[in-house]
Image (spheres, helix red, strand yellow):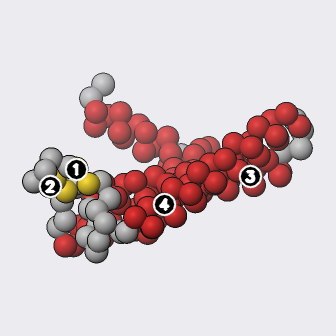
Amino acid sequence: MSIRDKLRSAIEYLYSPDNSDSFWNAATIIAVLAIAFLIGGGIYVLYYGYPFVIYTSTGQIYYIYPGSIQVGAEVIIIAVLLIMGAAGFYLVYRATTTVEDPELYQQMLYIGVVLVFISFMALFAFAAAK
């Protein structure tokens, strides 16, 4: 089976009436990734053509350059942190709606709060570095 046939079967699976939930789940994930890319500054970096990382003459590599320049690695890092925070909020939401298993509720709640906390702390640290 070629890659084209596999891709076609995957698209047919997503578009079939029996799997409409799968299509909307995939569409939601793609939308979240696109929004994180846009909020992270992806269009800005693509438009101005900044490099992925900045190398200095001393051999240092800057993934997040302190100044007005935003490099490609920074866009990816910020997008991942935004997605991590959104996943944490989703876990906290799901924990409040899952009442069947109290142990699962606690795990989802703790993991969600930790993800949100790490995401916010890292985003604030990167904002302070700029």
Q: Quadrant of residue 127?
A: bottom left
Q: Is residue 54 left or right of residue 27?
A: left
**Of the residues shown, which amino acid type is indicated by label 2?**
Thr
Name the residue that disc number 2 marks. 56
Which residue is depicted at the point 16% across and 53% down?
55
**Of the residues shown, which amino acid type is indicated by label 1?**
Ile
Under circle 3, the secondary element is helix
Q: Is residue 10 left or right of residue 52?
A: right
- Going from N to C along the chain, the mark reached first, 2 or 1, is 2
Q: Quadrant of residue 72?
A: bottom left
Residue 81 percent across, percent down from the top left: 49, 54
Find out whether the residues at labels 2 and 3 contact each other: C-beta distance under 8 Å.
no
Which residue is depicted at the point 28% across and 33% down?
3
Which residue is depicted at the point 26% across and 54% down?
62
**Of the residues shown, which amino acid type is indicated by label 4?**
Ala
Q: Nearer the viewer, mark 1 or mark 3?
A: 1
Q: Is residue 94 left or right of residue 121?
A: right
- Going from N to C along the chain, the mark reached first, 2 or 3, is 2
Under circle 4, the secondary element is helix
In three-dimensional space, the C-alpha distance between marks 1 and 4, rounded to whole angstroms, equals 18 Å
Q: Nearer the viewer, mark 2 or mark 3?
A: 2
Find out whether the residues at labels 1 and 3 contact each other: C-beta distance under 8 Å.
no
Residue 54 in view here: yes
Find out whether the residues at labels 2 and 1 contact each other: C-beta distance under 8 Å.
yes
